[in-house]
Image (cartoon, helix red, strand yellow):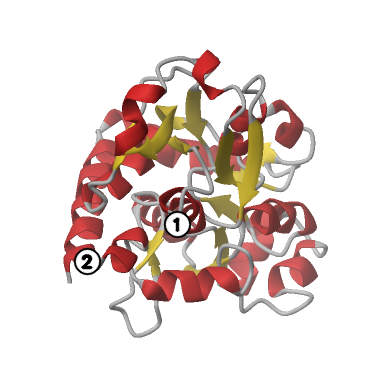
Amino acid sequence: MKKSLKILLFGAALIGALTASGCGSSSAPAKSDAAKSTAQGSLMETIKKRGKLIVGTSSGYPPYVFVDSESPDKSVIGLDMEMSKQIADKLGVKMEVQDMGFSALLSSVTTGKVDIAVGGVSPTPEREKVMAFSDRYLPTEQKLLVLKKNQHVYKSMADLKGKTIGAEKSTTQEATAQKVEGAKALGLSSVPDAILQLKNEKLDGIVLEGVVAKQYLIFNDDLALADVQFKDAKKISAVALKQGNDDLVKIINEIIKKDTESGQFEKWVDEYSRIAVEKAKK
């Protein structure tokens, strides 16, 4: 596989989708079906009447969500898509996916352009002021991805002073980068974009969720994880939705509880990590 293709681990089609809206394309009109109908009743009632669950996500984040470049419609797949399908099935409706940049994803929840948002979305005190979240799942840690040749240089937070640290915009990873004392934090439109900037040595490192970083290491043997330990580095995921929809939150929590207790989330991590690798080989 050529080096340029290694950077875009899940196919050139991913970047094409990402650039249309920061981190993904969205076919939603200026005022979406979700926005129009949410005002007419509770979100769950609206979803059932509409006959579909509108799921917002930001691809390029395997194994949670990534573009299947081999599918005719460049569909988004991953463990969070599997969970969302379970939610749609429980509600007795179809699922529609809107792929967009992460900052647009969060605002789409509050404006009602999407019903739920998934894709490694982490609750924060600031986000919880304007949107509701499900129970948490798949705890992991934030890691520092660097060029392998510089791996030995970064052993502690002090080693990052004066360095430029990248992360995807509007994410908890960007917030972590911004807290590194003496370092410059740079927000990028997508993880593949950040990887490219790192390889071109325009960044000294990237803050990335551990399980996601491992996907990019598989076909990028010039990259490595540094030993740097970030303070408060634990990261958890949840489903985001508009406030005031406790009935829908309850259903989502039941699904999360079932998938957590059965070990389904870990099975999906293994499955979609394998799928991502297989597709990257082609």
Percent from the top left, x then y, of residue 53?
A: 55, 64
Tags 2 and 1 in contact by the CB under 8 Å rule? no
- Image coordinates of residue 181 in percent, x first then y, are 66, 19
Res. 279 mark: 2
Q: Position of residue 14 (x, y in %)?
A: 43, 69
Q: Is residue 64 above or below residue 278?
A: above
SS of the residue at dot 2? helix
Name the residue rendered at 69%, 44% in the picture: 245
Res. 248 in view: no
Q: Quadrant of residue 161?
A: top right
Q: Quadrant of the C terminus?
A: bottom left
Which residue corresponds to the image point at 72% horizontal and 26% vertical from the top-left? 125
| Tag in front: 2 or 1 | 1
**124 shown above or below 64:** above
Amino acid type for the residue under numbered disc 2: Lys
The residue lying toward the viewer, choosing from 237 and 84, is 237
Quarter of the image for residue 210 reads top left
Residue carrying label 1: 196
Whether residue 180 is situated above or below residue 48 in the rendered picture:
above
Please rate how many residues cluster around mark 1, counting C-alpha atoms within 10 Å: few if below 14, some from 14 to 19, many from 20: some
Under circle 1, the secondary element is: helix
Which three-letter amino acid code belongs to the residue tagged 1? Leu
Residue found at x 71% / y 58%? 108
Whole-Å distance between the Cαs marked 2 and 1?
19 Å
Whether residue 150 sits left or right of residue 42 in the image: it is: left
Q: Quadrant of the N terminus?
A: bottom left
Residue furthest to the bottom: 72
Residue 246's x, y, as percent?
66, 39
